Amino acid sequence: MTNPQHDASQVNSQTAHDTNSETGRIKAPNLNAFKQVIESRRSVRRFTETPIPDEVLKDCLRMAMLAPNASNLQQWEFYVIDSAEVKQQAVKLCLGQNAAKTSSRLIAVVARTDNWRQHSKQIIDEYPEKPVPPKVKRYYEKLIPLVYTQDPVNALALVKWGFATAHRKLKGPVVTPYYTQADQVKWALSNTFLAAENLMLALRAYGFDSCPMGGFDEPGMKKLLGLGRHHHIAMMIGAGERAHNGIYNEQFRFDYDQFVKHV
């Protein structure tokens, strides 16, 4: 199993040594290419009929799943709508948006809140270091259940609150448990949004474009895709080759200092 956290540590280690010892300047050999991807990415509303090859989409989805995520639990799923009939219905559920209607690929990016226990076990089974370090087993077998276990009437919330409060008083800071189902949904969605951004940037790096859509009928889309109550659609993404009239307005952002605060 590819371990994104392990891979990231290797990259960070390499970057830390990639400095010119004479000038003290950081070498950034990939910076211009990265800037091109970031600065040329736009939310494209109209696409040409040029298809996205299967191997390209597969590689973009692979890169999407390298996104950082809490405890490597990987709570995301990607539903690529291949059927023309299903896409026609999905476009209606996307309120007929051109970004859905003209897309070469239409993808539902989904967060799940019901498989963290299964994924915890899978991490231990597929952990790249054998034997699995005891601290890793303790983390996934004891701490993860403490944080994520829910019950139908939310009676565990008080227990979790008491544990977290006592820990802060006696031992110091502790990760706040997820008290409610709503907390857990936010957690799963926040991780899935990171993967969605990776997907859109990967598509742009390949010369394609995308449009993230939050305007859709989620209950209807979940029914169409056969999803259950523990599935939460983070967004629909339309993707394809940018049409000449695919961008509706010039890009602009508010001033940098409005958002960046140094404390």
Image: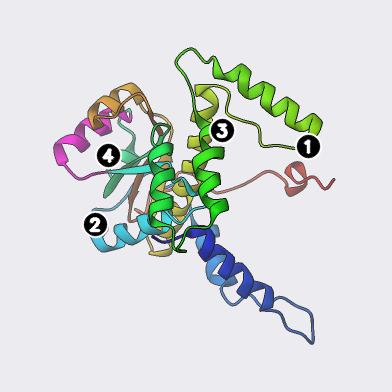
Quote the CA–CA distance across marks 3 and 2: 43 Å
**Residue shown at 74%/26% (left/top)?**
166
Q: Earlier in the sequence, mark 3 or mark 1?
A: 3
Give left or right: position of 131 versus 16.
left
Q: Nearer the viewer, mark 4 or mark 3?
A: 3
Q: Earlier in the sequence, mark 4 or mark 3?
A: 4
Q: Position of residue 125 (x, y in %)?
A: 38, 53
> Considering the numbered disc 2 on the image, is that residue within a helix, a strand or a loop?
loop
Q: Main secondary structure of the magenta part?
A: helix
Q: Earlier in the sequence, mark 2 or mark 1?
A: 2
* Residue 141 in view, yes or no: yes
**Residue shown at 15%/41% (left/top)?**
84
> Considering the numbered disc 3 on the image, is that residue within a helix, a strand or a loop?
helix
> Considering the numbered disc 4 on the image, is that residue within a helix, a strand or a loop?
helix
> Considering the numbered disc 1 on the image, is that residue within a helix, a strand or a loop?
loop
Judged from this view, the residue extending furthest toward the bottom is 22
Q: Give the label on residue 101, or none.
A: 4
Residue behind mark 3: 147
Q: Position of residue 39 (x, y in %)?
A: 55, 59
Magenta-colored stretch includes residue 88: yes
Going by the numbered disc 4, the residue's amino acid type is Lys
Q: Is residue 24 above or below residue 157?
A: below
* Residue 70 in view, yes or no: no
Please report the bounds of the magenta region as a residue range: 80-94
Q: Give the label on residue 171, or none.
A: 1
Residue behind mark 2: 51
Q: Earlier in the sequence, mark 2 or mark 4?
A: 2
Going by the numbered disc 1, the residue's amino acid type is Lys
Q: Nearer the viewer, mark 3 or mark 2?
A: 3
Going by the numbered disc 2, the residue's amino acid type is Pro
Q: Nearer the viewer, mark 2 or mark 1?
A: 1
